[in-house]
Amino acid sequence: FLLFLCSPAPEAVALREAFDWIVIPMLNPDGVIQGNYRCGLAGVDLNRIYDSPSKKLHPEIYHLKQLLRDNPVELFIDFHGHSKKEGVFFYGGRSHDDQENADIRLLPRMCAMASEDFNWRACSFGVQQSKLSTARLVSFLNLGIIKAYTVEASFSCAPTQADGEEAEIDEANLSDDEDDEQKLANIV
């Protein structure tokens, strides 16, 4: 998607003109270099401290939260790998307002319609107590970003059949990445 967004395609130009795009490729480089994918050097799961990050212990989260607070944000997406569920799917919030809930579900639904890689049935929309300090829910509940999502993608699970056996993958049915990028860009 980023290659498309930076391209000279008319849709990409329109997206760049309509919105300011802030892309942070990795919030945990110090942890990852040490072999951690969730915890920073302080040994804390960085996606569980967005409610009150320490400027000293979690500077990347502290400054991202300030950036989100100080700028109008139409869409926030936090990308993660998932070790158990298959495919690509969204987690989003849930409002008491039916129109807001429709707005929240629109982008995930359109992505699922545009690409077989997105699994609409695996999407979940809610506010779980155990997730209140995550980027998605702090953005949604505390910062007022209605379209705040976590997009999860399977780490490496192969599709499975009902009997638990690994399913055959038909390479002819695998989607063309460039075609999917164009479809998703048109959705945005």
Image (tube, rainbow, N blue to C red):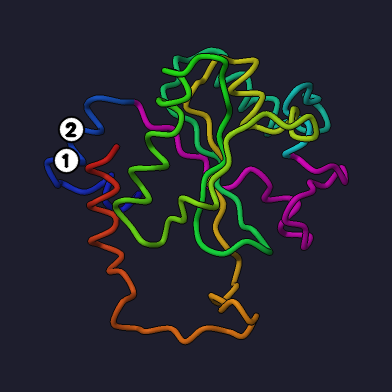
- Binning the other alpha carbons within 10 Å of mark 1 as few (below 14), some (14 to 19) or many (20 upward) gives some
- Position of residue 35 in the picture relative to residue 12 (left or right): right
- Position of residue 136 in the picture relative to residue 132 (left or right): left
**Image quadrant of residue 163?**
bottom right
- The secondary element bearing badge 2 is classed as helix
Magenta-colored stretch includes residue 129: no
- The secondary element bearing badge 1 is classed as helix
Q: Specify start and end residues of the magenta stretch as a single range.
A: 20-46
- Foreground of the two, 183 or 47: 183
- Foreground of the two, 49 or 108: 108
Residue at 47% in and 87% down? 168
Picture layout, residue 150 above or below residue 118: above
Circles 1 and 2, Cβ within 8 Å, touching? The answer is yes
- Which residue is label 1 attached to? 11
Quadrant position of the C terminus in the picture: top left
Q: Which mark is residue 115?
A: none
Picture layout, residue 160 above or below residue 99: below
- Which residue is label 2 attached to? 14
Residue at 43% in and 55% down? 118
- Foreground of the two, 61 or 116: 116
Question: Where does the image place residue 128, in percent across and percent down from the top left?
Answer: 73, 32
- Position of residue 55 in the picture relative to residue 66 (left or right): right
Question: Where does the image place residue 94, in percent across and percent down from the top left?
Answer: 58, 25
Q: Main secondary structure of the magenta part?
A: loop
- Binning the other alpha carbons within 10 Å of mark 2 as few (below 14), some (14 to 19) or many (20 upward) gives few
**Image quadrant of residue 139?**
top right
Marks 1/2: CA–CA distance: 5 Å
Residue at 69% in and 31% down? 61
Please state which amino acid type lies under the numbered disc 2. Answer: Ala
Question: Where does the image place residue 18, in percent across and percent down from the top left?
Answer: 24, 25
**Image quadrant of residue 58?**
top right
Residue at 63% in and 43% down? 27
